[in-house]
Amino acid sequence: MRMPSLIWFLHFMNLTKGLDGTRRSSSVSRPCPAGCATCSAPNGCLSCKPRLFFHLEMDGMRQRGTCVSSCPRGHYGMRSPHISTCARCKDDCSSCFSENFCTHCHPGHFLFRGKCENSCPDGLTANTVLRECTECSIDCEMCVRSTVCVSCRADLYLLHGQCQLTCPAGFEPDVQLMQCVPQVHCEVGGWTDWGPCVRKRSTQASRRGQETRDRQVLRSPSVHGDACPHVSESRKCALKKRPE
């Protein structure tokens, strides 16, 4: 691994300052930040205390050296006998364990055996949530984990992350979504009062009439839910005499 030139330059300058005893860092007059062995006002840390990693971070338009116990996301720790540094992960890795072993990938890439791939090999699903190539169960078409499906094969229905051949009691198949959805049974409200007694058309000479009452459908049933009962009924009634 080639060390970034700026890190070598800062480290070299720090060593030369310590050789003649005259070019000391500005830490003589101002305390260095925590973790620094030596430092300078414009460049920050120049060398670190044992077991710490030297890391360059942006400070406005320039870079400053810092000493950290663990490297920030997107970098990995690289130790050597002289100086331990934070090196940047590959472009498609959002975090990594080493130069050649990614642990998380940027969007659009999927982790497979420590590499970030554009697509997953046959038999594995590109998990957009975890950004990993996931081995789904045999019934799954896509999954977030091997036991939690997002979609199923064409002949199966999804329910609670599992693929079902038939939907259990209380559920029914939605053939458009290919999911088991809760059954909805019809609900109706209460009856209204009986309406006025009106004469039947076919019995105009009769004193008998008919009155009606209704009730509203509060919830329509699903395809396999219980159907609605009748919502209107009539009964015979006696017409009132008209005053003479």
Image (cartoon, rainbow, N blue to C red):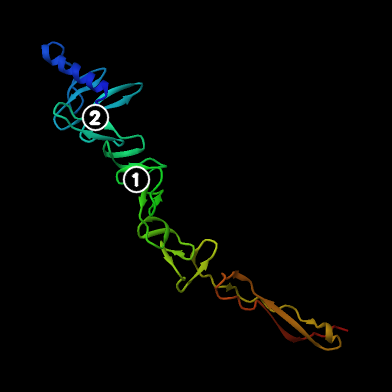
Q: Is mark 2 on a helix, strand or loop?
A: loop
**Residue assigned mark 1:** 111
N-terminal-most mark, 1 or 2: 2
Q: Can residue 18 be seen in this view?
A: yes
**Residue assigned mark 2:** 1
Image quadrant where one finds the C terminus: bottom right
Classify residue 117 as left or right of residue 42. Answer: right
Classify residue 208 as left or right of residue 124. Answer: right
Dividing the picture into quadrants, the one containing residue 17 is top left
Give whichever of 20, 87 is nearer the camera. Answer: 87
Looking at numbered disc 1 in the image, what kind of residue is underneath it? Answer: Leu
Classify residue 173 as left or right of residue 149. Answer: right
Looking at numbered disc 2 in the image, what kind of residue is underneath it? Answer: Met
Across and down, in percent, residue 61 comes to 36, 21
Is 115 above or below relative to 147? above
Across and down, in percent, residue 27 comes to 17, 18
Q: Can residue 71 be seen in this view?
A: no
The residue shown at (32%, 42%) is: 115
User: How dense is the environment of label 1, judged by Cα within 10 Å: few (below 14), some, or many (20 and up)?
Assistant: many
